[in-house]
Amino acid sequence: TIEFEGKTYFMAASENREGRCLLIDPQTLQLHELWHHPGGVMSLVALEDEPNCFVAIQKFFPIFISDDAEIIHATLSRAQDGSIACTTRHVMNLPFCHRIDVIDAKGGKAMVASSLCGGKDFVDDWSRPGKVYAIDMPVPEGKEPKAQVLIDVLNKNHGMSGVFDKTGKKIGLLVSGQEGTFRLDPPKSAQKDWRVTQLTGDETSDTAFLDIDNDGVEELITIQKFHGNELNVYKQIDGKYQKIAHLPISFGHVLWAGKLLGRMCFLAGSRAGEKDLSAWWVQVSPQGELSFVRECIDTNITPTQIAVFSKENSAQILVASNEAGNVLLYTLQ
């Protein structure tokens, strides 16, 4: 979401060439086209300390045609004819840039960016691993920023998700790939450095972090293998994350964890099989044992990205459908 003129809007964009980026009014569902070129958008992140602004990845085209991928900065404004306009500027080139996010660091903000790989000679070439970088913000216009390498080897990066404290403030990030899942904790001052902690060594596509049983320690929920067929739950036991549940998924591609309608839940999508989006409701026995009950939200939608907007008694789920090339909005009450 992004705030513009005191109102919250959804954002959605296409990975295809000439793909559009849309601003969506969640109340009227009116669409505002921000751009229709160049597409290849993998991430959209609103900037809390820059009103009406966001950063995005462009030129990451399927399938892995991403040598020219770049990060851009965008600003929304009201045009003379009353429409919503968008101006963009180049931030930095980062080949195969697959995920970005923004977090508090060093008394300001930092952008974390990860690359899928370091280069390709053919589609299945994974001989050159990607990296994870930190870039201090704001980035001066017209200057290529300096990028600090946080993780030097991370192949097939797919997951990047937030770690939140009890107030909902983002305090860290999870990134994942062939080498496992890593937690990034940003420095609070310029005199300190990032802390990188490896949580698992299993090849992981997507991750979510949530204390699902309210014992004060977050569980790790993952889709394993790159676009894999394993939906797993890890619990920290004796200081290590150990797998406690294995749930079905097919070509897993989206993952979210949080509270829906007052209950702990995680959402997971399959781009093969039933091509479904499912909710897994968490149940805790009196003995503290965890179990998970699946509820299918929809089938034949090939979910590619997901965003969830949860309130106390309702929730909206925004899903990008890869196969249909559309955006779906579900309301739970």
Image (tube, rainbow, N blue to C red):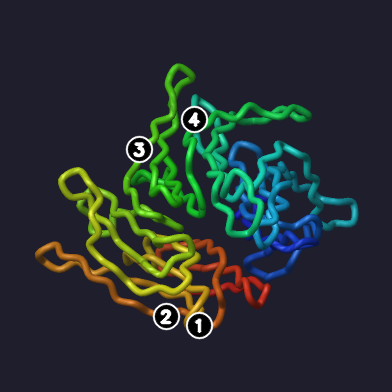
Left/right of residue 262 with respect to residue 287 in the rendered view: right
Height in image: 235 above or below 286?
above
- Residue annotated with mark 3: 197
- Which numbered marker is on residue 296? 2
Q: Amino acid at mark 1?
A: Thr
- Residue annotated with mark 4: 105
Q: Going 35% across and 38% down the picture, which residue do you hit?
A: 197
Q: Amino acid at mark 3?
A: Thr
- Residue annotated with mark 1: 299
Rendered location of residue 215, percent (x, y)? 20, 52
Rendered location of residue 54, percent (x, y)? 66, 45
Q: Are marks 2 and 1 in contact (CB under 8 Å)?
A: yes
Q: CA distance from mark 2 to mark 1?
A: 7 Å
Q: Amino acid at mark 2?
A: Cys
Q: CA distance from mark 3 to mark 2?
A: 34 Å
Q: Amino acid at mark 4?
A: Ala
Query: Which quadrant: the N terminus?
Result: bottom right
Q: Going 49% across and 19% down the picture, which residue do you hit?
A: 190
Q: Secondary structure at mark 3?
A: strand
